[in-house]
Image: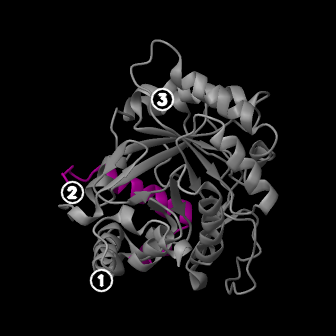
Amino acid sequence: MFGLLRPALHALSPERAHGLTIALLERLPLSAGPRADPILHTRIAGLDFPNPIGLAAGFDKDARAWRQMLALGFGFAEIGTLTPRPQAGNPRPRVFRLSEDRAVINRLGFNNGGLEAALPHLEPNPRLGVNIGANKDSTDRIADYALGVAAVRDRAGWITLNISSPNTPGLRGLQGDALPDLLTAAAEARDQTGGETSPPLFLKVAPDLDNAQIDVIVAAALDSRIAGLIVSNTTLARPGTLKSSHAGQAGGLSGAPLMAPSTAILAAFATRLSGRLPLIGVGGIASGADAYAKIRAGASAVQLYTALVYEGPGLARRIAAELAALLRRDGFSTVADAVGTQLQA
């Protein structure tokens, strides 16, 4: 069905097509979703997922359709990025399909309706994560993250601190010397008295990091109350293999060209962490083989978004089935058994 609809959707601007998709998803009747294959059960940071295939932040910015995405076969879903105040984002056009490359470039700039508007759409669900960020014009970005954590801590299975979007000027600077203060403030906001829950905190990092930057992030994460890392966000790099006429657009590149570099960064984090913190792998996943490669490089679970633009809503089920077959082919009994095995080879 999606193969028939895709030409019509791709005739629209990317943002208009996405808005239509969210509106259609909101109208779908809710269901329990497909029956999970037991081999795919995943436990990460105390959270149980029926499979390790997650929906990355950015698809459902304002928490309008995450339940429907779970029903379509995702093991977990992350909404946002949410900022304390509503934010229009950068001027349009700001999203570009690179169809020849199975990729997207976006410079959205954390466009969202703000925390207050999203809260009624959230609920305490171990399969729901909330991705939070800072407003572009904020004078205290660390305070923005603390405010976001405090606002959603009772309505999220986990909370992700997004400090790696390339589309908010200066945001990636929080991956450096300011990181310990940010992680401390976020943990204190999460643990303040009166909260009913204490959801795990994840940190989402960029793929455009050198070895020294990776070492700084690993040291800060291990010295904090962070539960895990999400590796990685979109990239500012432009591989020479890109064919699309949109390749020179400013913004973050996602999709197939990000698969190899993001997996390399994932492996670098996994090598340094040696299992001390779990990792979620993101970037370029469009098949069971891609998900398996991330898992073997050190990811306990994975997330995707861009491939949905080209493959449609049945993608999560297909990847789950392909991944289960690969695990059985190689003699693994669980996803956890395969985590990091490429690094041990």
Residue 146 lies left or right of residue 37; in this view the side is: right
Above or below: residue 174 compared with residue 17? above
Say if mark 1 contacts mark 3, CB within 8 Å. no
Expressed as whole percent of the image width and height from the top left, the position of residue 96 reads 63, 69
Above or below: residue 123 compared with residue 214? above
Above or below: residue 305 compared with residue 135? below
Task: Return the residue found at the far top.
Answer: 194
Q: What amino acid is found at the position of numbered circle 1 in the picture? A: Arg
Q: What amino acid is found at the position of numbered circle 3 in the picture? A: Val
Q: Which residues are magenta?
A: 6-32
User: Within 10 angstroms of label 3, few (less than 14), some, or many (20 or more) residues?
Assistant: many
Nearer to us of marks 1 and 3 is: 1
Circle 1 is placed at which residue position?
Answer: 329
| Residue 29 within the magenta-colored segment of the rendering | yes
Say if mark 2 contacts mark 1, CB within 8 Å. no
Residue 212 disc label: none
| Residue 233 within the magenta-colored segment of the rendering | no
Q: Quadrant of the N terminus?
A: bottom left
First in sequence, mark 3 or 2: give its number.
2
Dominant secondary structure of the magenta stretch?
helix
Q: What amino acid is found at the position of numbered circle 2 in the picture? A: Gly
Residue at screen point 40% across, 30% down:
155
Circle 2 is placed at which residue position?
Answer: 33
Quick check: can you spot residue 221?
A: yes
Toward the viewer: 314 or 190? Answer: 190
Residue 234 lies left or right of residue 44; in this view the side is: right
Label 2: which secondary element: loop
Circle 3 is placed at which residue position?
Answer: 152
